[in-house]
Image (cartoon, coloured by chain):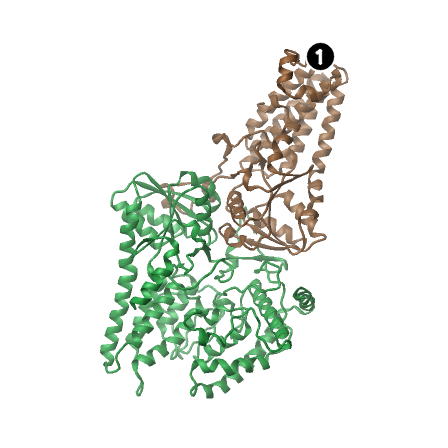
Chain colours: A brown, B green
Amino acid sequence: MPGADKETDLSERIESFLSELKRCGSGAGSLRGSAETARETTALLRRITAQARWGNAGELMEIIRKEGRRMTAAQPSETTVGNMIRRVLKIIREEYARSRGSSEETDQQESLHKLLTSGGSSEDNFRQHFTHLKANVIEAINELLTELEGTTDNISMQALEHIHSNEVIMTIGRSRTVEAFLKDAARKRKFHVIVAECAPFCQGHEMATSLCKEDIETTVIPDAAIFAVMSRVNKVIIGTQTVLANGGLRAVNGTHTLALAAKHHSTPLIVCAPMFKLSPQFPNEEDTFHKFVSPHEVLPFTEGEILSKVNAHCPVFDYVPPELITLFISNIGGNAPSYIYRLMSELYHPEDHEL
Amino acid sequence: MADSVGRQVDSINHATGKINRLKLFKRKELTKEEKQRLRKEKKQHKKNKKDDRGPPEKEKEKEKASVPAPSKPATQSPAHKAAPVPVNASASESPVAAEKPAKSKAELRAERRARQDSERASKQGKKEGGQQSTSSKPKATPNELQPVVKRLPDHVQVDDPVALKKLAKKLERQQVRQINIVMLCLLSDCCPLTDDGFIQVFSEITLHIPVTVIHPSIVRLGLQYSQGIIAGSNARSVALLHAFKQVIQDYSTPPNEELSRDLVNKLSPYISFLSQCRPLSASMGNAIKYIKKEISNIPSQCKEEEAKRILQECIDSYINEKIILASEAISKYAIEKISDGDVILVYGCSSLVNHILCEAFEKQRKFRVIVVDSRPRLEGREALRRLVKKGIRCTYVLISALSYILPEVSKVFLGAHALLANGYVMSRVGTSQIALVAKAYNVPVLVCCETYKFCERVQTDSFVSNELDDPDDLIVTRNGKTHLENWQTVKSLGLLNLVYDVTPPDFVDLVITDLGMIPCTSVPVVLRVKNVDQ
């Protein structure tokens, strides 16, 4: 039966996506950039919308939420998956509201007046059936996909406004967004880049080799020299794994030190992050915030005799508080960290913050 | 204006930039050097050192070649600014090389750029009326200002070609060959001597050091320094003093010479040799000053055996007082600061801090230690081994995980390489970062340092004067891929491996010395008191 085939095909795809997520988190599989993950998640959600069986918006949202919970559980540190799911849920709500004819703006704002007057009208269970809802939702998801494809280019287009000639720019680790940003600026400007190598994974080395292919003057320094070198630096431009709801960052380890050193020297810290990295998480969830990988990167097994008597830690991420950040550059333009809460309210519905 | 000249220079360099030109340039230099040397040797016996500085300077300026030295944009001075970055080069970067330079390309470029810039500046200066380049310190004035301005030693001013030529001259006069020791060599306890009295060290570079000029224990010491076999400020000073004891033992006063004057003169080429192998640390500098003072204080009617005995005793007492007993005193003070339940963070391998922790553990204090380490030296592993052997509970992280581990920490103990007169702490690179992040988390930072490491230099950032380590140490192979393997072939890629950095005094809460616990800003007071004592 075609329906059953579609369903098995769908669940197969979901399973394979989940196993991909699990694998690349442990570092065994190939490391995927966040952009790819976002695109794949969105494509998968579109497929779910198209192929799963649902009658009204509420059911669709339930299905997506269920799958979403499984996906985020497979790799909790990969927040882009959760972000895309929340975006799609918001799209569904919007399309539903548009089909119903009511404008979404008034529905969203929870003012005291509304609470008083509306009473129970927001008990809208999304139970109404609309024939064109499916098509509309799929179209909106397609728009989202196009937006995702253009994020890196949108960010790089802003590069010339921020980088001028003969500047010394510092960065840490490897971020594809920052790479594209700097390469775009290098077409018209001459500047120097210092890359902190970010032990133990040393992704800074890859970044440096990739940058100097475009003839950008690059210098690689060890992490210990970040503060020593900072007095010579004009700007610090970094990428991040996640932008948190308070405007802080969850970035690769070593970024907090870099941010503190930049603050001490009053050097601006610019974060290049596309909007799909914005997550409604807060940094206070201690047990879910940090991710650790095998400490043999730090203390290899060759140090056998002391290994058993020593605790070695290898955290992957760092928290950077919003006070240390000067500017966020995203695909929709530049923003201060204090504005992040507003952007988040536009992207996600408050009820979706907990999947 | 300087920028446009810089661009012109860059275009010239782009057209002519080949290493061959550099070699030609160097060979030209050397022949000129030899000519100068012959001329100077006649003069040197008549005049003393201070007068020598006057005439050779002017001669050199006239004879300065107008060969455009090819220099590629320095990758180790990242700022594209007109003023060169004077970097205190280690032995392997001395530009007037007698041997084939096996230096890294980036260091070559840095020197060439620096030399090129200062030559250009001085050429402009000559047009404007023979002023010397402003980037170098004026040489004429220190003679009058000696008590006020502390001059940097010659080998520090890498950017000034005049100073470099002077240094080369001085070394020639002392019959010390400038050495580029870059290759690794497996050195056993003493250097093997070949038949004709020369020392064959490397398979690829043969170091012909006439043994009659440099004492073999000094040669061995120099090689141990440059290979990193002896590392750490205390270890280097102690090794130096032991080598000097050996030298004094083997010394015999030539006829018609006074021991007090001749021995000091004998020591000077040794010190030049050692500083070529690896730049002297502040502690070594102070030790050398002490020895020279002791030697010159020997009364002239003293017999040679007696004098030697006195000097040996002086050296022994110096080592005992300033290093061994000092570390006992510092431990005593520091242990007061360690309380039960403490979590102490240490960085790298400081012999003093390890000693303190071991003593505290023996005195039954309950604490645990977090050892922070950094690439490429990974000295923290050595500290980890020593502490674990004692039985102390340890945690080990890399410096990038500092923000993660600091909320657990109650105190930070740091060692120092030197304490500068403006209160800055010069220590292994990464120390300033630890102090910075500790300050942000409100964790007290305690620096442990003996008083013999206090020096009168001042410095505000880690760039003006530093030591550069081998950049190839940064290369690492992960998952079978080495990204930076051929970094030297890539024009726009450079690696920077600093050895030291300076920590501002506002990050440091307390300095524990053998004289007591003082704030960072009291260093000049201690120096003044010490000078008055002596």
Residue at the spot 27% in from the left edge and 62% down from the top edge: B321
Q: Left of B259 or right of it: where is A66?
A: right
Seen at 44% across and 48% down, the residue is B434
Where is residue A78? Give x, y as percent: 58, 33
Q: In which quarter of the image is the N terminus of chain B?
A: bottom right
State the image coordinates of residue B421 (x, y, percent, origin top left): 41, 61
In the displayed image of the protein, which residue is found farthest to the top?
Answer: A120
Does residue A300 show up? no
Decide: is B65 above or below A331: below
Q: Mark 1 points at which residue?
A: A128
Q: Which of A163 and B367 is in front in this view?
A: A163
Task: Tell me the chain of label 1.
Answer: A
Check disc 1 and give the amino acid type: Gln
Say left or right for B83 vs B392. Answer: right
- Residue B41 position, x and y percent, is 46, 86
Observer able to see residue B463: yes
